[in-house]
C-alpha cells in the first residue's frame, strides 16, 4: 500500500525541544517505557535518551473502523496485549473502537421516532433495561408524556402515576455525590449504558435483582467482550434558555453556542455549533427539584424531553486476561484548533484541542504537577485561563477551581432546571494534564492514535462519510488505565512469601477484603521489595526479564534477558535491575527526591513496579470532576473489588449498614452498574407511597 | 486552519502531499533519503533508519514527518511462554488471528495448572479417566468420561456449560473449595511424591485473568466454538422503547 499523505500536520520542528525534554527524562533514571520499535534497530543506546522511544510509539487507527457504508466498526479483537514495556497501543485502540461502535449514528437503522444522527447508544441497555426494581412501577426508559411546563405542572402530578421514565440522570456525581454546574448554569446529565454482552452476563448470572447481586459468587468475573459506556451530556434544549424576549420555556429559546475562548482562537479554533459538532439527541431527563436542605433530587418517573449534547464519555471494556476493566476516557475537542500538548511535548502539531476545560497542558500551561505538600493546589492563585470554557469560568484561580459547589447555598430554578444568576458555575481544569502522576506530558501513543484518527476521519469524509450526521470526529481519546499485571486482579493479593504460604493461596489478613490496585504501599510488588529476603515475583513481567522477546526474525518487541544493548527498548530495566541500583519503590512512589525531600513522584505506570498500565491519574473532568485528587487517584480508586457504599466509593469501617450498597468484596464490584442499581432501587423504594 | 482550508484539505486529499500542512522536519533540514524507491517511503518500516530520521518506526515522508497509519496491527504472543503478566518468556510470534494467540495462551495455562494430573501417563489420570486436557480435539468431541457421566467436560461455545471451566472457577475460591486445581495439600498425592519433590510448583493456580483467557478459548477459539460469538453480542443490542422518545429534528415538545 502506498502511504497516503498526512493531512493534519506533521511531526515537525519540535525535535530539539523534545530532545531537551527527553534528556530530562533520561536523567530520571532507568524506567523504561513501552515502544515496540523492533527490526534492525541497532543504534547505540549511549546516543539515545532512554525514553525517546515513547514519543515514537505508533498507534494506528484501524483501517476497518469507518466503513463506507456507515455501519459500525467490527468488535474489538479479543486477545491479551503484552504488558509493559511493550506498546500500550492495543488498550488505547480498544477504548476508541468501542467509542466508535457505541456512537455510530443510527443512519438508516432508525426506529420510528429516532433520528439518523442518534448514536447507537440510544439502543444500549441501561439499568432500567437490565435490572428488576423492587418497586417495579416505572415505565420503559426514555419514554414520557409531556405535561404543563414548569414547577406548577410538575407539582400537580408529582404524586401521580409515572408519566414516563428518564434515560439520563444521576446528576450527583459518583465519588462525593456533588453536582457539576456548567457555564450555562445547568447540571450535566449522566448515562450508564452497557453492550449486549454485559446485559447477557447480568441475566445469565441472575444478577438483575438486589437479592441476586447480594448472593453473587465473589469470584465471578466479567468475561471478555463486555463493554460499559458512561456518558456526560449537556442540556442544550431551547426550552431551558430564554428567547429573544427573555421569556423562558419557549421552543424559541436561544442556546448559547459552545464557548470559543481566546486560547482556542490562538490555536486556530473556530466557533462551533452544537448540532454540527456534538453528538446530540433528544432525551427524557429527570425533572429536578431542590429540597429545603438544598439537595437536588431527581424525579425520573415524570421526565421532561430535552435536547442534549455529548460532552465526554468513558469507554470501559474487558479483554481476555483483563477482567478488571480497561478504562478509556474520551472528550469533545475543537477539531479546528491545534492541540497544544503534542506541540509542547512531542514536537508535532495536530488538530483537535480539548474545549471543555482549559488546555493547560500546552505552552504557558501548568508548570508543574501538584506538590504532595499541597495536593489540592490550594496555594496556587494563578488562573488556568482567562477564557470561558464549557466547564471553566475564565479567570478563575486554580485554587478556586475543581471545587464542588454546596447546593444548599444555591437556589435551583425549576422553571429552567438550572441555577441561574448566581455565578454558581463550576470551574474545572486538569490537575494532571497528562493524566499521569509523574509527568505533565500525555502518552506518545495517545498522540499517535489521535493524529491517525484525524487522518482516518478525513479519508472517510472524502469517501462519503457525512460529518453533519456522523459527529464522531469531534471526539478524541484522553487516556486510559488498566492493570499492567492483571494476574494480581483478585479479592486479595498473594502473601508476602515466595511460596505463598502453605496452601499456595494464603491471604493477607485471613479473609479477602478486596483490593484497590494502586501503586502505593498496598502494591504487592512494592511490599515484596521491602521484604527480607526480597520477594521479586520473578515470573511476573519485568521481574528479571524485560518485554516481549524478539521473534526468530527479530521483528517484535524486546529481547529476552534484556540488558539495554540487545533489546529494542534502550536501557529497558527490570525490577531486579532497579533493586540492584538501590532503588526503594515505596519511597519513589511516595515522591521521595534524591535530596530526601518529597515532591512529585519520579516514577509512574512505566516503572517496573507498577501494577497499573496507562495513566494513573486518569479522571474525566465532566464525570468525576471533583476527584482529580483529594485521595482519588484514578478509576480503580473506586472501581475495585472492595465493598461499595452510597457514595460509590469503597465502603469504610465507619459506614452504617444502610450506607453500604454492596456489602461483600466481589470481582464484579469493579463495575458500579450494580451498586448504582442498588442505590436507585433504595431511593425508589424509600420514595414509594407508604414509606 | 480555518473551515475553508479544512475543506480544501479534504478536497486535496487524493491528489498531492504538497497540499497539506507540513512541518519543516527536524531542525528544518530535510533528512537525506536512505532508501531509493518510492518517494513516500524513505526508510523501511521499523528500521533504525526511520528512527534516525524522525524518532519513529514509521517515519517515511520527505519532510521527516510520520505518515498516518491506518491498519490493524499484528498481535504479538509468546508461544508457550508468558501469559497475561506471568511466566517464562519465549521468543515471540505474530499473528493477525486473535484465536491463534488465545489458543496458545489457553494451552499454556492448562499445561501449568492441569497437565500434571490430566495428561497421558500422569498418576492421577488413571483414576480420573481424564488425560486429555491438552488435547483440544478430544475435549471438543469427548463430552464426558467415566467419572463425569452426563457432564460435558468442555462445551465449545459455552464456557459456563463446561464442567472443566466450572471446576476451575470454583477453584478460585481457594483452599477447601473443592475446585480445581485441588488444594495444595493434596497435590503431592495426586502427582506423586517424587514429581512433587522435584517441582513443588508443579501445579500453578489459575487467576481470574487466566480464567478469562480460558473463557475466550472455549467461547470462540477451540474447535467447534462460536467463531462469531462477539459479533452477535458485542454491540448494544436493541433495548429501551420500541419507538423511542421523539424525533430530534421535530423539536422538543413531542412524545412517542
Image (cartoon, rainbow, N blue to C red):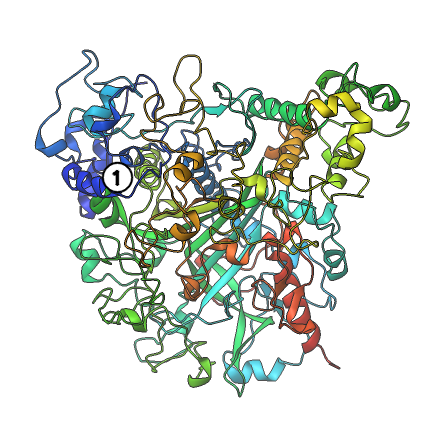
Q: Position of residue A526 (x, y in %)?
A: 49, 47
Check disc 1 and report its element: helix, strand or loop.
helix
The mark total stands at 1
Which residue sits at x=33%, y=51%? Answer: A434
Any part of residue A112 in sight: no
- Vertical relation: A437 (above or below) B183: below
Front-most of A157 and B30? B30
Could you tell me which quadrant the C terminus of chain B lies in?
A: bottom right
Q: Is residue A151 left or right of residue B224?
A: left
Q: Is residue B207 left or right of residue A571?
A: right
Q: To which quarter of the image does residue A374 belong?
A: bottom left
Residue A475 vertical position relative to residue A175 in the rendered view, above or below? above
Residues A85 and A278: in front is A85
Q: Chain of mark 1?
A: A
Q: Residue B82, image x and y in percent?
A: 54, 27
Extreme-front residue of the structure: A532
Outermost residue to the bottom: A292
Q: Which residue is mark 1?
A: A26
Amino acid at each position: 500500500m502506498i502511504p497516503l499523505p498526512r493531512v493534519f500536520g506533521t511531526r515537525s520542528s519540535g525535535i530539539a525541544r523534545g530532545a531537551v525534554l527527553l534528556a530530562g527524562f533520561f536523567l530520571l533514571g532507568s524506567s523504561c517505557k513501552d515502544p515496540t520499535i523492533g527490526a534492525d534497530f541497532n543504534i547505540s543506546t549511549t546516543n539515545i535518551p532512554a525514553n525517546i522511544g515513547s514519543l515514537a510509539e505508533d498507534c494506528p487507527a484501524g483501517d476497518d473502523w469507518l466503513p463506507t457504508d456507515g455501519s459500525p466498526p467490527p468488535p474489538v479483537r479479543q486477545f491479551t496485549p503484552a504488558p509493559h514495556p511493550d506498546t500500550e497501543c492495543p488498550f488505547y485502540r480498544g477504548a476508541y473502537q468501542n467509542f466508535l461502535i457505541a456512537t455510530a449514528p443510527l443512519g438508516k437503522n432508525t426506529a420510528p421516532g429516532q433520528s439518523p444522527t442518534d448514536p447507537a447508544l440510544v439502543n444500549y441497555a441501561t439499568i432500567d433495561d437490565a435490572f428488576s426494581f423492587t418497586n417495579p412501577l416505572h415505565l420503559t426508559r426514555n419514554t414520557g408524556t409531556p405535561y404543563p411546563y414548569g414547577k406548577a405542572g410538575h407539582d400537580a402530578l408529582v404524586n401521580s402515576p409515572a408519566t414516563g421514565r428518564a434515560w439520563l440522570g444521576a446528576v450527583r456525581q459518583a465519588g462525593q455525590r456533588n453536582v457539576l454546574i456548567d457555564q450555562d448554569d445547568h447540571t450535566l446529565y449522566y448515562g450508564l449504558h452497557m453492550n449486549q454482552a454485559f446485559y447477557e452476563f447480568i441475566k445469565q448470572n441472575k444478577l438483575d435483582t438486589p437479592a441476586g447481586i447480594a448472593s453473587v459468587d465473589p469470584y465471578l468475573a466479567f468475561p471478555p467482550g463486555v463493554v460499559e459506556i458512561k456518558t456526560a451530556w449537556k442540556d442544550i434544549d431551547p426550552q431551558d434558555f430564554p428567547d429573544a424576549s427573555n421569556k423562558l420555556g419557549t421552543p424559541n429559546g436561544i442556546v448559547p453556542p459552545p464557548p470559543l475562548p481566546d486560547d482556542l482562537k490562538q490555536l486556530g479554533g473556530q466557533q462551533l455549533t452544537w448540532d454540527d459538532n456534538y453528538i446530540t439527541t433528544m432525551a427524557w431527563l429527570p425533572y429536578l427539584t431542590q429540597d429545603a436542605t438544598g439537595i437536588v433530587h431527581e424525579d425520573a418517573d415524570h421526565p421532561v424531553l430535552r435536547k442534549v449534547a455529548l460532552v465526554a464519555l468513558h469507554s470501559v471494556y474487558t479483554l481476555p486476561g483483563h477482567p478488571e476493566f480497561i478504562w478509556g476516557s474520551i472528550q469533545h475537542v475543537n477539531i479546528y484548533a491545534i492541540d497544544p500538548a503534542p506541540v509542547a511535548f512531542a514536537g508535532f502539531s495536530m488538530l483537535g484541542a480539548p474545549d471543555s476545560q482549559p488546555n493547560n497542558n500546552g505552552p504557558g500551561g501548568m508548570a508543574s504537577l501538584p506538590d504532595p505538600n499541597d495536593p489540592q493546589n490550594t496555594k496556587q492563585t494563578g488562573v488556568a485561563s482567562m477564557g470561558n470554557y464549557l466547564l471553566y469560568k475564565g479567570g478563575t484561580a486554580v485554587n478556586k477551581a475543581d471545587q464542588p459547589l454546596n447546593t444548599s447555598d444555591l437556589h435551583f430554578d425549576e422553571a429552567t432546571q438550572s441555577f441561574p444568576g448566581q455565578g454558581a458555575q463550576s470551574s474545572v481544569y486538569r490537575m494532571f494534564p497528562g493524566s499521569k502522576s509523574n509527568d505533565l506530558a500525555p502518552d506518545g501513543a495517545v498522540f499517535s492514535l489521535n493524529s491517525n484518527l484525524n487522518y482516518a476521519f478525513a479519508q472517510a469524509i472524502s469517501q462519503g462519510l457525512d460529518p453533519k450526521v456522523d459527529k464522531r470526529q469531534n471526539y478524541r481519546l484522553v487516556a486510559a488505565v488498566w492493570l499492567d499485571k492483571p494476574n494480581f486482579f483478585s479479592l486479595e493479593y498473594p502473601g508476602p512469601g515466595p511460596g505463598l504460604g502453605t496452601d499456595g493461596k494464603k491471604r493477607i489478613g485471613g479473609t479477602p477484603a478486596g483490593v484497590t490496585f494502586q501503586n502505593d504501599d498496598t502494591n504487592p510488588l512494592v511490599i515484596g521489595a521491602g521484604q527480607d529476603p526480597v520477594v521479586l515475583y520473578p515470573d511476573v513481567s519485568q521481574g528479571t526479564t524485560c518485554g516481549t522477546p524478539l521473534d526468530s526474525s527479530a521483528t517484535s518487541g524486546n529481547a529476552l534477558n534484556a540488558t539495554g544493548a540487545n533489546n529494542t527498548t534502550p536501557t529497558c530495566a527490570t525490577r531486579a535491575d532497579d533493586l540492584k541500583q538501590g532503588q526503594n519503590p515505596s519511597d519513589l512512589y511516595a515522591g521521595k527526591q534524591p535530596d530526601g525531600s518529597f515532591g512529585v513522584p519520579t516514577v509512574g505506570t512505566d516503572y517496573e513496579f507498577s501494577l497499573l498500565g496507562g495513566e494513573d491519574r486518569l479522571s474525566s473532568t465532566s464525570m468525576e470532576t471533583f476527584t482529580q485528587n483529594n485521595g482519588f487517584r484514578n478509576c480503580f480508586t473506586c472501581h475495585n473489588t472492595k465493598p461499595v457504599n452510597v457514595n460509590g466509593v469503597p465502603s469504610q469501617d465507619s459506614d452504617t449498614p444502610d450506607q453500604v450498597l454492596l456489602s461483600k468484596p466481589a470481582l464484579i464490584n469493579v463495575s458500579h452498574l450494580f451498586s448504582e442499581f442498588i442505590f436507585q432501587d433504595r431511593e425508589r423504594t424509600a420514595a414509594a407511597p407508604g414509606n | 486552519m480555518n473551515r475553508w482550508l479544512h475543506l480544501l484539505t479534504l478536497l486535496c486529499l487524493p491528489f498531492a502531499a504538497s497540499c497539506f500542512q507540513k512541518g519543516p522536519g527536524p531542525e528544518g533540514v530535510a533528512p537525506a533519503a536512505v532508501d531509493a524507491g518510492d518517494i513516500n517511503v524513505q526508510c523501511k518500516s521499523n528500521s533504525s533508519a526511520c528512527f534516525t530520521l524522525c524518532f519513529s518506526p514509521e517515519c517515511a515522508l520527505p519532510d521527516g514527518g510520520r505518515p498516518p497509519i491506518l491498519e490493524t496491527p499484528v498481535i504479538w504472543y509468546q508461544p508457550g511462554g508468558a501469559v497475561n503478566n506471568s511466566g517464562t518468556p519465549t521468543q515471540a510470534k505474530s499473528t493477525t488471528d486473535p484465536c491463534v494467540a488465545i489458543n496458545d495462551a489457553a494451552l499454556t495455562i492448562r499445561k501449568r495448572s492441569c497437565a500434571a494430573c490430566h495428561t497421558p501417563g500422569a498418576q492421577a489420570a488413571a483414576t480420573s479417566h481424564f488425560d486429555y486436557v491438552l488435547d483440544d480435539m478430544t475435549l471438543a468431541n469427548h463430552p464426558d468420561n467415566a467419572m463425569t457421566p452426563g457432564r460435558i467436560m468442555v462445551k465449545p461455545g459455552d464456557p459456563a456449560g463446561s464442567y472443566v471451566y466450572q471446576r476451575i472457577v470454583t477453584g478460585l475460591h481457594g483452599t477447601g473449595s473443592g475446585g480445581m486445581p485441588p488444594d495444595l495439600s493434596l497435590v503431592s498425592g495426586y502427582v506423586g511424591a517424587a514429581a512433587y519433590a522435584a517441582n513443588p510448583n508443579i501445579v500453578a493456580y489459575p487467576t481470574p485473568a487466566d480464567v478469562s483467557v480460558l473463557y475466550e478459548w472455549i467461547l470462540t477459539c477451540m474447535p467447534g466454538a462460536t467463531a462469531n460469538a462477539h459479533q452477535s453480542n458485542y454491540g448494544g443490542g436493541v433495548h429501551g422503547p420500541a419507538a423511542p422518545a421523539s424525533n430530534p429534528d421535530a423539536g422538543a415538545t413531542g412524545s412517542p
